Amino acid sequence: MRSPKKTLADLRSSIRSPVAATMCIIGCFFLPAQTFAAQEPDRVSILSDADIESWGQDAGQDMWKERIFSGQTIYEAVEISERPALRATSRSTASVLYLEIRVDLEKTPYLHWDWRIDKSIPGADERTKEGDDYSARVYVVRSHPILRWKTRAVNYVWAGTQAQGQTWPSAYTDASHNVALQSGDTQAGQWISEWRDVRADFQSLLGEDARTIDGVAIMTDTDNTGGEAVGWYRNIFFSSEPGEGE
């Protein structure tokens, strides 16, 4: 993938304020989407089985872009449990895959996805810059068309030390908030299906009535802790209905 290879250390060394952090960490690679996703009225596909099966073979992959911060996490299509998945392998690296797509949260506010990890990242305090690594994360971004420092993000993570259900602001900017949906290794090696009311999360975590979002990203990174992690992602979509267990 064609991305500027600027190291995360270089990028972070220039960050001296929440404004710069917002622009660089969550906003610099998202531009406000100009059109709404042309999808079914009650479902917006983000990463389907068909997308993964054709990964690297046609223009489908080109819709996703990569931002390299510190080395390159390897994202590749694989088959696991008799189904395609996108596997992310990080070895002291940090790069993100993101899809610029505007989603109408008034119609389809519920984000669904399946994820799996090999193991969590032990001993790191995710509330600090030194521990801000995750075996798997999925996050949604809302951009401002002019005021880039008003970019906001909600980051759903598989934590290593923070307990399941905990929430906390990013160590780099309070414009991004983390939610630990899974924690530790109890569920490692298993596929877990998640769903979240994104509009409700923006309201409760960031105090913002988000009627649209402008992008979705996935990321497996270990650049701060210097270890290794493997995460898998599949079946990402928005819908008008919540998942099971409401």
Image (cartoon, grey):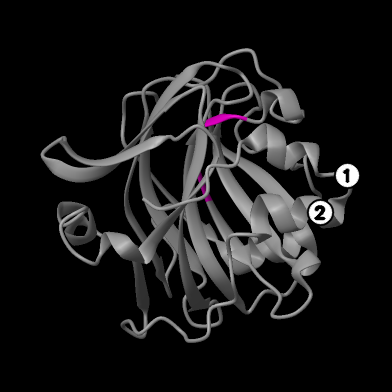
Pointer 1 local density, CA inside 10 Å: few below 14, some 14–19, many at least 20: few
The spot of residue 208 in percent (x, y) is 76, 70
Magenta stretch containing residue 136, yes or no?
Answer: yes
Q: Amino acid at mark 1?
A: Arg
**Which contiguous range is marked in magenta?**
133-138
Q: Which numbered marker is on residue 171?
A: none
State the residue in front, 70 or 225: 70
State the residue in front, 67 or 208: 67
151 left or right of 193?
A: right
* Rendered view: 108 above or below 15: below
236 left or right of 225?
A: left
Residue 125, quarter of picture: top right
Q: Which residue is mark 1?
A: 16
Residue 159, quarter of picture: top right
Give the overall secondary structure of the magenta segment: strand
Q: What secondary structure is marked by label 2? A: helix
In contact (CB < 8 Å): disc 1 and disc 2: yes
Q: Residue at x 70, y 37 (%)?
A: 10
Q: Which residue is mark 2?
A: 20
- Residue sticking out furthest to the top: 123
State the residue in front, 125 or 198: 125
State the residue in front, 110 or 175: 175
Q: Residue at x 15, y 35 (%)?
A: 81
Q: Amino acid at mark 2?
A: Ala
